[in-house]
Image: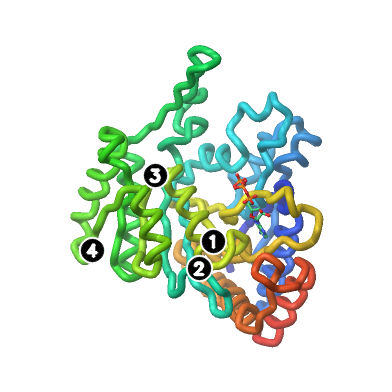
Amino acid sequence: MKSYRIGVLKGDGIGPEIVQANLRILKAALSQFQESFVEYVESPIGFEAIHSHQDPVPASTIEELKKCHGWILGPHDSASYPEILTERRNPSGELRHTFDLFANIRPSQSLPGVQGLVQNVDLVIFRENTEGFYPDRNMYHGVGEWMITPEVAISTGVFTKKAITRIAHAAFQSAMERRRKVTIVHNANVIKLGSGLFLRTCQEVAKAYPHVTVEDLHIDAMAAHLIRRAGDFDVIVTENMFGDILSDLTGELVGSLGIAPSLNCNENQAMAQAAHGSAPDIAGQNIANPMGLILSTVMLFDWLYVKYHDDRLKKTAVLIRRTLDEMMKMNIKTKDLGGSETTTQFTDAFIQMMNQDK
Ligand code: ATP
């Protein structure tokens, strides 16, 4: 029987707390099987790696991840790294770039028992992950930002047909499995060349999916439409920065940024990463919500199932997801969702409920 190597990167801020909660839940879910088939490979990243290797993303961590089927990444607090390191790509940007994880898939779904600002939401954002308006990751070498004088800065946006084509295919393929509707989000009325290429390329890809309804909206209008009628959207495809901003918005719309998951992937590997950051304001207090990372891990196991067709992976994902829905229905929640559970209490209750359900 096949086994899987899963990398574990704890990260900074609330990272170690939510990664630990996540691992406890994953191990409990996997204990339903007689034989263990998941090997955990822990590697340093962020502050831990700066202390041990003087590098937030050491070469040894990259080498270990190359041998993994997928991995779980805790958030990082790269804004607080020593100044000499802040000029580099941040750890998640570095991993996305190194492994060419071109698709950042960020779903937002109304959960039972969670009072969101908008009801009946079930959408997924396909965010292009390798170029666009982020100058620290849209270059092969160096950073696409310069200061001409202390008062003049130039930041590049990069848009290539190749990168747009592959994220568009990923979005349309997902739409075929869902409600068959894709919204292309762009700003082609102003950024005529870059955003124009994004829109046109997505529209060309759409021709290969005649059963999918396609619409396009400008990024500013999209922000308003999401608040007004997020429930109408199915799959959204957009460039790197627009996707990052919209997914924070949709995360909050369905309840809390703390429950927003994401998966970074290509055809070969996938990285589970909650959409939120390292939340330094609540780090070390045992109050962080681990749900965003738990749902990201469910996405990782779903992705592994699609790739390897191993029923044990699907069963693991389904069990964790079902338990999470039960937890919400029974109002067992952390503070950000109006509950009173600490991270540890939430995790204990989760495992107890999952064990009853097995
Ligand atoms: P980054 O730039 O790294 O994405 P950020 O500055 O956007 O980070 P976050 O770290 O995501 O910010 O935090 C935004 C707010 O959401 C903070 O008030 C934080 O406490 C809260 N938050 C984020 N994640 C969680 C979580 N898992 N549980 C509870 N609250 C959270």
On screen, 157 above or below 348? above
Q: Please indicate whether residue 199 sits to the left or right of residue 51 in the image.
A: left
Residue at the disc numbered 1: 252
Which quadrant of the figure contains the C terminus? Answer: bottom right
Residue at the disc numbered 2: 117
Cβ atoms under marks 1 and 2 closer than 8 Å: yes
Mark in the foreground, 1 or 3: 1
Q: Secondary structure at mark 1?
A: helix
> Marks 2 and 3, how far apart in space?
25 Å
Q: Look at 33% across and 60% down and name the residue there.
A: 173
Three-letter code, disc 3: Glu
254 and 37: which is toward the camera = 254
Which quadrant of the figure contains the N terminus? Answer: bottom right
> Marks 1 and 3, how far apart in space?
20 Å
Please tell me in which quadrant of the rendered image residue 27 appears. bottom right
| Colour logic | rainbow
Cβ atoms under marks 4 and 1 closer than 8 Å: no
Three-letter code, disc 1: Glu
Residue at the disc numbered 3: 239
Q: Horizontal and vertical percent for residue 53?
A: 76, 33
Residue at the disc numbered 4: 213
- Asked if the residue at label 1 sits under 8 Å from ligand 1, the reply is no
* Res 338 visible: yes
Ranked by sequence position, the earlier of labels 1 and 2 is 2
Q: Look at 44% across and 49% down and name the residue there.
A: 243
